[in-house]
Amino acid sequence: MVDGIGSIEVSDEVIRSIINVCSSEVPGIAGVSEETFMNGAFKMLRSTEFPKGIRITDDEETSGKKVDVSVQIEFGVAIPAVACEFQKKVKNQVERIAGISVSEVNIHVDGVQASVETPTGPRVVTPPETFGAGQSAEDEDEAEIASETQD
């Protein structure tokens, strides 16, 4: 950015910080994924995949930035809705705070995290009551009522 006095530059680290804060403000986002340096470097050398986390690149066509964010989603939420909300939040906040145009925000969901409230073990299901062969609970209730009225 340039004003009448000089230039203003915002580093990619500032944009990463903004994105990390946004991830904590969107319900359903468990967090931005992190990757070790060695694993990330290996992926960059061996494939077109980018390392987990946040990648910011210059968009030559729009003079803005392209953002790729790899996230973990909380178990049980609608992934498309949460990802869309996160996209909007990242774009709006980066443009508002840093004054940098964001041409695209790509969200990569690479995992699901269960929260403390999420049951992760086997669920306990109460088995249905068993009755005599071919007899239902209603039949037993009717038989009980009939025997009481006969007495």
Image (cartoon, helix red, strand yellow):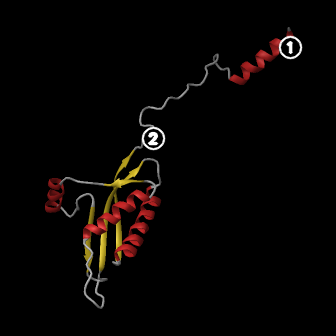
- Splitting the image into 4 quarters, where does residue 61 fall? bottom left
For the point 86% across and 10% down, which residue is it?
Answer: 150
Q: Which residue is mark 2?
A: 118
From the top left corner, tell me how far across and down residue 19 is, in percent.
34, 64
Q: Which residue is mark 1?
A: 149
How far apart marks 1 and 2 lie (CA) works out to 50 Å
Q: Earlier in the sequence, mark 1 or mark 2?
A: 2
- Residue in the picture at 38% in, 46% down: 113
Name which residue lies at 37% across and 61% down. Answer: 21
Label 1 or label 2, whichever lies nearer to me, is: 2
Q: Indicate the quadrant where residue 53 lies.
A: bottom left
Q: Residue furthest top?
A: 151
Could you tell me which quadrant the N terminus lies in? bottom left
Residue 54 x %, y % = 28, 63
Residue 101 image label:
none
User: Compared to 72, does 11 lie above or below?
Assistant: below
Total marks in image: 2
Query: Helix, strand, or loop for circle 1?
Result: helix
Q: Which amino acid lies under the numbered mark 1 shown in the image of this protein?
A: Thr
Q: State the image quarter where residue 24 is shown.
A: bottom left
Q: With respect to residue 2, does 98 lie above or below? A: above
- Residue found 35% across the figure and 54% down from its top: 31
Q: Residues within 10 Å of mark 2 (few under 14, many from 20)?
A: few
Q: What kind of element bears circle 2?
A: loop
Query: Disc 2 marks which amino acid?
Result: Thr
Left or right placement of residue 72 versus residue 77 in this view = left
Q: Is residue 56 above or below residue 135?
A: below
Tell which of 141 and 1 is nearer to you. Answer: 1
